[in-house]
Amino acid sequence: QVQLVESGGGSVQPGGSLRLTCAASGLAFNAYAIAWFRQAPGKEREAVSCIGRSATSTYYADAVEGRFTISRDNAKNTVFLQMNSLKPEDTAVYYCAADLRVIGCYSTSAAYDFWGQGTQVSVSS
């Protein structure tokens, strides 16, 4: 059974940092591209970042470029999202997702086969 478990969310002040972790089990992790999506109340789910299976391909949404960094540790079946300089508009539930893909990664949610349950990130003063 495939499981993706997010952790590391919480409440921070603007300008603060959080590191999200996505721990995967039940799949050949190094064969999957992994993405982070987020959904704020009343808004559609949007792609934040993704990383190809060999970590040579990455994508960042314009809203987070330069502030967030995605990385992966295939030996530990884990993907990280380092979030710096957080803004109130980053407040959302963050989800990780897995896509069996040979090359690159997609920012489209329909491409992803497996999803985690999400972790809440709240940024406010």
Image (tube, rainbow, N blue to C red):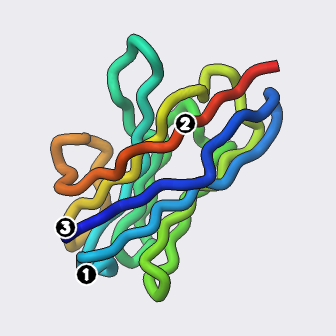
| Three-letter code, disc 1 | Ala
Which residue is denoted by mark 2 in the rendering?
Answer: 120
User: How far apart are labels 1 and 3 at the CA level?
Assistant: 9 Å
Quarter of the image for residue 120 reads: top right
Task: Judge from the rendering whether residue 24 lies leftward or rightward of residue 64; answer left or right.
Answer: left
| Three-letter code, disc 3 | Leu
**Residue for point 52% across, 34% down:** 62
Label 3 crowd (10 A; few <14 / some 14-19 / many >=20): many
Which residue is denoted by mark 3 in the rendering?
Answer: 100
Task: Judge from the rendering whether residue 90 lies leftward or rightward of residue 31; answer left or right.
Answer: right
In this picture, is 75 found above or below 39? below
**Residue 66 shows in this picture:** no
Indicate the position of residue 34 as horizontal and vertical percent values. 36, 61
Front disc: 2 or 1: 2
Indicate the position of residue 21 as horizontal and vertical percent values. 55, 60
Mark closer to the chain start, 3 or 2: 3
